[in-house]
Image (cartoon, rainbow, N blue to C red):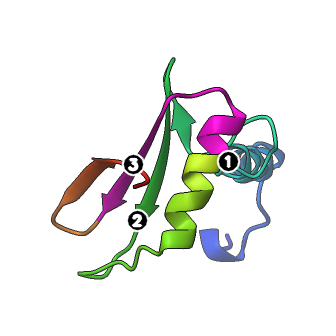
């Protein structure tokens, strides 16, 4: 009998992998109809995550999130920074 790592993936396993990939693509703001990672009735939320102890947030990133929210008719733009030991949640407001 072959070890699992040498066996060909089953049809179901392959389909599940493809579905997960498509779901990730859809939820990542890749489509014009659904920006950001998720949204509420009046807010667009974008999640930035890293395995490192710091994350760089640029003005261009923030501006894009605001523009995406406005394009979807959302009043609020929210960013979540997902660090190994912390979540930072903030509303984005342009001066």
Q: Is residue 1 above or below residue 29?
A: below
- The residue depicted at 72 percent of the width and 49 percent of the height is 13
What residue does disc 2 label?
A: 49
Relative side of 35 to 32, left or right:
left
The percent coordinates of residue 68 (x first, y second) are 66, 45
Q: Is residue 74 magenta?
A: yes
Boundaries of the magenta span: 68-82
- The residue depicted at 62 percent of the width and 68 percent of the height is 4
- The residues bearing labels 2 and 3 have C-alpha atoms spaced at a distance of 21 Å
The percent coordinates of residue 34 (x first, y second) are 71, 37
Mark 2 or mark 3: name the one nearer the start of the chain: 2
Say if mark 2 contacts mark 3, CB within 8 Å: no
Residue sitting farthest toward the front: 95
Q: Is residue 1 above or below residue 65?
A: below
Tag shown at residue 20: 1
Mark 1 or mark 3: name the one nearer the start of the chain: 1
Regarding mark 3 in the picture, which secondary structure is present there?
A: loop
Q: Residues within 10 Å of mark 1 (few under 14, many from 20)?
A: few
Give the tally of numbered discs.
3
Observer able to see residue 3: no
Q: Nearer the viewer, mark 1 or mark 2?
A: 2
Q: Residues within 10 Å of mark 2 (few under 14, many from 20)?
A: some
The quadrant the N terminus occupies is bottom right
**Foreground residue among 64 and 55:** 64
Q: Residues within 10 Å of mark 3 (few under 14, many from 20)?
A: few
């Amino acid at each position: 009998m072959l070890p699992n790592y040498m066996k060909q993936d089953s049809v179901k396993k392959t389909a599940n992998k493809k579905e997960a990939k498509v779901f990730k693509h859809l939820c990542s703001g890749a489509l014009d109809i659904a920006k950001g990672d998720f949204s509420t009735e009046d807010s667009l939320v974008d999640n930035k995550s890293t395995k490192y102890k710091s994350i760089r947030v640029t003005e261009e990133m923030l501006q894009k999130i605001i523009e995406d929210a406005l394009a979807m008719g959302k009043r609020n733009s929210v960013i979540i920074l997902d660090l190994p030991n912390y979540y930072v949640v903030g509303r984005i407001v342009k001066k």
